[in-house]
Amino acid sequence: MTVVAALYHFTRFTDPDALRAPILALCAEEGIKGSLLIAAEGVNGTVAGPRAGVDRLLVHLRSLPGCATLEHKESPAAEMPFGRMKVRLKKEIVTMGQPDVDPTASVGHYVAPKDWNDLITQDDVVVIDTRNDYEVAIGTFQGAIDPETKSFGEFPAWWEANKDRFHNKRVAMFCTGGIRCEKSTNYLIGQGVEDVFHLKGGILKYLEEVPAEDSTWEGECFVFDGRVSIGHGLTEGPHVLCHACRQPVLPEDTKRPEFEDGVSCHLCYETTSEDRKTRFRERQKQIALSAARGERHFGAHS
């Protein structure tokens, strides 16, 4: 069984570039794959590998400056959900595009998964899903508002256009693992919102700890790895990924006429040009040829 670890931590790295090579070397030694983002504001990502290797990586990450209290969330995978290991340097570990936002200064009130249902069912509480539209499409909490954003960077503009709807309301926010809410709650505090709450550990922790029979979650939770979606108990969900548009689809959707592996699905067929479809077909052809030779093509899906 492969261990999947999702993690993030906000701190201040004076030289993020110096952290990259040691992490890559450790992951190569331990057979760990996945993706980590490093920026001056901290670290974020999801990795997978054997138990001992993941434990060693976590020890290393917690030894970095300001990372002693780094938390992570684990779930199992029947197969390795990543094709390679990537450690990338970024301006932000989760891109919001708001230079004044600082989660190390202040964030909303954390709400434990066991207390989440009681909070979000109260009349004076509005619940906002801070994830992207394609994530919300396959699952969210009952009664949650979907901002219909294509990226997290669109959230501030959405809030500015809609904030009057939430006058005199307490605001509860959630996301996959909690990182977006660190920034979105700090942003709302900066906008003068007094009562801001967020789900500690995100949806992943909720699905791990709250029994299905007591849950207010509906559907599946999108994850950024080969499992595509997970459900209660962090069991793998039914979704697969359209490798053309990177959106989750159900197995039955792959039987639709618009679906062509790596080329299109019913969600992107009408918006993808024939020229792009032709390029995608060539990519799929090269991936198949590499696989037949026992090699991994550079454009293969990770």
Image: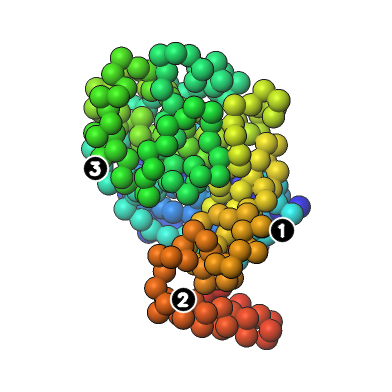
Q: Earlier in the sequence, mark 2 or mark 3?
A: 3
Q: Amino acid at mark 1?
A: Glu
Tag 1 residue = 79
Residue 274 image position (x, y, % from top left): 42, 77
**Res 277 label:** 2
Q: Residue at x 47, y 66 (%)?
A: 269
Q: Would you place residue 225 above or below residue 106 in this image?
A: below
Q: Would you place residue 281 above or below residue 61 in this image?
A: below
Q: Residue at x 37, y 18 (%)?
A: 170
Q: Nearer the viewer, residue 261 or 182?
A: 261
Q: Amino acid at mark 3?
A: Pro
Q: Nearer the viewer, mark 3 or mark 1?
A: 1
Q: In which quadrant is the C terminus drawn?
A: bottom right
Q: Earlier in the sequence, mark 2 or mark 1?
A: 1
Q: Nearer the viewer, residue 120 or 23?
A: 120
Residue 252 lies in what quarter of the image?
bottom right
Q: Amino acid at mark 2?
A: Lys
Tag 3 residue = 99
Residue 113 lies in what quarter of the image?
top right
Crowd rating for badge 2 (residues with CA inside 10 Å; few <14, some 14–19, many 20+): some
Q: Nearer the viewer, residue 52 or 35?
A: 35
Tell me the CA gap for discs 2 and 1.
29 Å
Q: Is residue 70 visible?
A: no
Q: Nearer the viewer, mark 2 or mark 1?
A: 2
